[in-house]
Amino acid sequence: MVTAARSADVQADAWLAGVYARSAQRHERLCPRQVLGVRMGLAAAEALGVDPRAPGRALYIFAETDGCFTDGVEAATGCSLGHRSMRLMDYGRVAIVAAHVESGEAVRVSPAAGVREAAAGYAPGEPRHYYQQLEGYQAMPDAALLRVRPVRLRVDLAALLGRKGLRVDCDRCGEEILNGRQHIESGRPVCQGCSGAAFYTAVAR
């Protein structure tokens, strides 16, 4: 006889396997950093009282590095650049800051110290470090794998979420500016490129 608790565990395991599969679809295989992304996304959601399986966009994610790690975060939370619910803050660190869109409450999730070495204890009989991490990161409890701590954002989350539907043309180059990202100079809207904040320099043809 299958108990209700066991049935729930089976469903949870199947759902988590699906999350890992969604992340792996973007690559040739599932890798340790994807697993970390999944685990961090789920831990952040839990810390902020959000069910990532529920519809809606309750979270906003700041990812501190790019690559396969962020695919794991996206698979777990549904947050993405395409949905305008994720932002890359390229600090070169495998970590995220997750914010609750309504309350503004935020947590930072990062690997606990020594997780690479600790993973070996959760992958008995596996001598290869890569596969120790791949298996261990999936099996380790949150307390052993992750560090979750509350933080306070120093950016305006409402401004990052943007003003949907707002479109203006730059007074200098004429290009369209979306989501309220213009600067105002002499009372006129100017794009960040024309205002001198561009990350590129035009080259004469």
Image (cartoon, grey):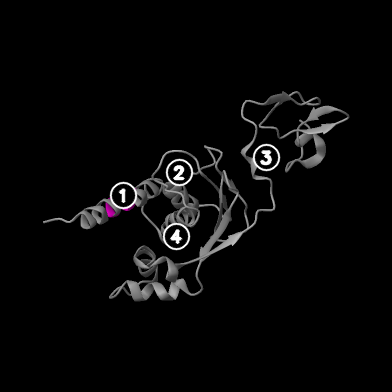
User: Which comes before the other along the chain, label 1 or label 2?
Assistant: 1
In front: label 2 or label 4: 2
120 vs 192: above or below: below
Q: Residues within 10 Å of mark 1 (few under 14, many from 20)?
A: few
Q: Residues within 10 Å of mark 3 (few under 14, many from 20)?
A: few
The kind of secondary structure the magenta stretch mainly shows is: helix
Residue sitting at 81 percent across and 36 percent down? Answer: 195
Find numbered disc 4 in the image and state the secondary structure of the residue it sits on.
helix
| 41 left or right of 17 in image | right
Looking at the rendering, the stretch of residues picked out in magenta corresponds to 13-18
Whether 103 is among the magenta residues is no
Q: Which residue is mark 2?
A: 78
In front: label 4 or label 1: 1
User: Which comes before the other along the chain, label 4 or label 1?
Assistant: 1
Q: Residues within 10 Å of mark 4 (few under 14, many from 20)?
A: many
Q: CA distance from mark 1 to mark 2?
A: 14 Å
Q: CA distance from mark 2 to mark 4?
A: 15 Å
Residue 105: x and y, percent?
58, 52
Q: CA distance from mark 4 to mark 1?
A: 17 Å
Amino acid carrying label 3: it is Ala
Amino acid carrying label 1: it is Trp
Q: Name the one closer to the observer, 11 or 66.
A: 11
In front: label 3 or label 4: 3
Amino acid carrying label 2: it is Gly
Q: CA distance from mark 2 to mark 3?
A: 20 Å
Q: Which residue is mark 4?
A: 36
